[in-house]
Amino acid sequence: MQSMLCSRNVGGTPLSARNYRAPIICYTQRRQAVQQPYLARKMIQSYPLLAHTSSTRLCSYSAEKEAIFRGFYCNTETAVVSELAQSEGQRLGIQNDDWFYGEFSFEAITSLLQTINPKEGEVFLDLGSGMGKAVLAAALTQPFSECRGVEFLPAVHAYAEKAAEMYDASSKAAQGTLESSSGGESVWPRHCPQVKLEVGDFRAVDMTTADVIYCFATCFSRDVVDYLDMSFTVLKPGTRVLMASKALTCPDLRPWDPPVVQVEMSHTGGTLPVFVYERI
């Protein structure tokens, strides 16, 4: 769930171990197909669609929560945001012929997060948070203490801010009714995660406080993935990393079990592999 802003020919410092600061470089699927080693491709083929997991296993998912989530984005269309991302990039002077905005459904992202066993009090971080959908889905369904997101495009981030304001208002209102409610379990947890969304370059973000890092990296170039590979060496042990469509080679990360899952995209009906790791 994020905007994929990209330009292949933007000036910047060459990539090195610690000084890569050029603007994010990304490509659309038709310009650069996802290139994975043969073994990774075999792994991808061996796992079923995560979104098709039986609902009895999605203990944190409910139709009521999804209805609340949809209410945050009732007047927002993915196609419109994709066009907005293109115009925003042009306004910022970043030229590129192809643009891409991708996201997973609420149920799919909930199921994906369940695979890494979120623990109470952990921190969730979305690198390239777009409209904030993954962040708010995590806040609604998982026992995190804090859910954070960083988005590069201000115009796209504005949608996230509006949704976060609705989340804050709804969660605060719900907390006031928990003690007086009777019968059945409340849709809202007794302690709702704090949501923090910011606009900027995720390379300036401190990742060491995160316990779960999510990145919809479909259109990230190899340079950006390499940068993340290097950055993830500083993560604290036990941190789980979810990388949509791009495998990592960081020696400090070990594959999770399962190491890769197929997740359905809400806007296209297609699927993407998500590579799952743990910092050792």
Image (cartoon, grey):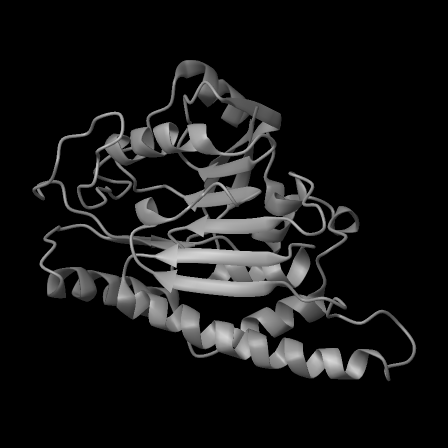
The percent position of residue 172, horizontal first and vertical second, equals 65, 79
Q: Quadrant of the C terminus?
A: top right
The answer to whether residue 207 shows anywhere in this view is yes
Q: Quadrant of the N terminus?
A: bottom left
**As rendered, which of 108 and 198 lies closer to the eye?**
198
- Total tally of numbered discs in the picture: 0
**As rendered, which of 48 and 242 lies closer to the eye?**
242
Residue 79 lies, with reference to residue 116, above or below; the image says below
Task: Kindly identify the residue that appears in the image at 61 percent across and 55 percent down.
Answer: 107
Q: Is residue 245 left or right of residue 119?
A: left
The percent position of residue 231, horizontal first and vertical second, equals 38, 33
The answer to whether residue 108 shows anywhere in this view is no
Q: Can you tell which quarter of the image residue 50 is in? A: top right
Q: Can you tell which quarter of the image residue 151 is in? A: bottom left
> Please, which residue is most extreme toward the right here?
183
Residue 135 lies, with reference to residue 18, above or below; the image says below
The percent position of residue 215, horizontal first and vertical second, equals 43, 44
The percent position of residue 128, horizontal first and vertical second, equals 37, 52
Q: Can you tell which quarter of the image residue 67 is in? A: bottom right
Task: Kindly identify the residue that appears in the image at 35 percent across and 72 percent down.
Answer: 158
**As rendered, which of 123 and 247 lies closer to the eye?**
123
Residue 79 lies, with reference to residue 266, above or below; the image says below
Q: Is residue 242 left or right of residue 86?
A: right
